[in-house]
Amino acid sequence: MDNVLITRTDRLGDVILSLPVAAAIKTANPGTKITFLVAEPVAPIVTLCPWVDDCLTISNTVNPSSVVATLRERAFDAAICLYPRPRVASWLKQARIPLCVGTARRWYSYRFNRRVNISRARSNRHERDLNLELLRGLGWNQWTTVDPVCVPSQDSQRAARIILEKAGIDAQRKPIAVVHPGCGGSARNWKPERYRQLCQALKESGMVVLVTGTDSERPLAADVVGELRDSIVSVAGATNLHSLAALLQQASVVVGPSTGPIHLAAAVGTPVVALFGPVRTTGPNRWGPLGKGHQVFVPPVDLCDCRIDHCRVGDCMDMIPADAVAGAVIRAVRANTPAHASDQNARKAPNRPI
């Protein structure tokens, strides 16, 4: 195979957890050209992955005939549909791609000529590994498994430094803790006041605390900052995906719920402290950050099948105390800060055992 298309047309975190499929193909066949087909808003992140050569995008208003024509023109040898959707399956079939891999459990799976029988919802396996299972459709029985990697460009790094400067933050002076409180409703989450308590504790420990978010999450970020606005900085809406990746790379630690930015932080090499609910399909076994040095908090309740917007015990996320999360953040910073630069801040950090 010299020319392979990988399709993943959902959200940021899903796409990041799909990048190891490109790595596996590149490791086995370094000369293979890898193209990703993704939703337009996510495309900037794909361009930061060293295993991806090209990127095609779609939007909600895309012309199907145009997509099919582009796919035919590219003359792909194989396509792997990691996020099965009827219209994507239809496009791949109409494009007459010789090998077209997808899952076997959908009503439209007949549109794939190579089908892999996997069930994601109840597998208790990580999303990355479920994505890699689709390689069986190419006749593979083994592959190299790696964590996602994104490499911010120099332009992105400059943009991140400008954002920090405008916020009055000296990235070299203190450890920076990024708190990303939004998740777009994709998982259970803390209330804003819990994030505010966390920000206060981190500020008291001597850290610079930066709250991030999308433009639509500005009100949430403002709610989190609240009366702490003189000491906690919000840059919600000030970043695009490239500058966010660089900003997360410059942070000492990133805190957030089950959402794309925690996977982006992990992919650029920054330790993550993540908050997950107990809902079976959104838990850390499937969606946790990949790599070393990350810590995950889950409420002390049994796994459940609750809806994201309804908890059987009221709000189980309240069972994750802010001081425990603060303690984990402080330890993560200490573990990743050279001793000569962290002694002063370490002496300021309060003892917050978990």
Image (cartoon, rainbow, N blue to C red):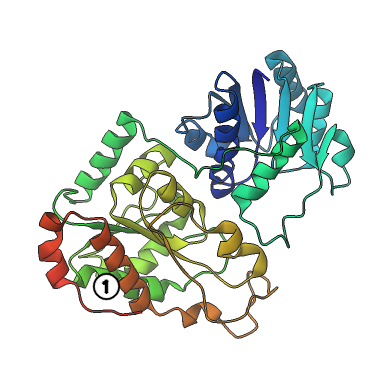
Mark 1 nearby-residue class (10 Å; few <14, some 14–19, many ≥20):
some
Asked if residue 204 is positioned above or below residue 274 in the image, the reply reads below
Q: Nearer the viewer, residue 137 or 287?
A: 137
Report the residue marked by disc 1: 200
Asked if residue 348 is positioned above or below residue 218 in the image, the reply reads below
Q: Quadrant of the C terminus?
A: bottom left
Asked if residue 107 is positioned above or below residue 332 in the image, the reply reads above
Seen at 37% across and 72% down, the residue is 325
Seen at 51% across and 69% down, the residue is 189
Q: Secondary structure at mark 1?
A: helix
Q: Quadrant of the N terminus?
A: top right
Residue 56 seen in this snapshot: no
Does 57 sit left or right of 198 as displayed? right
Image x and y of residue 152, in percent: 37, 35
Does 210 sit left or right of 337 as displayed? right
Residue type pointed to by label 1: Gln
* Picture quadrant where residue 348 is located: bottom left
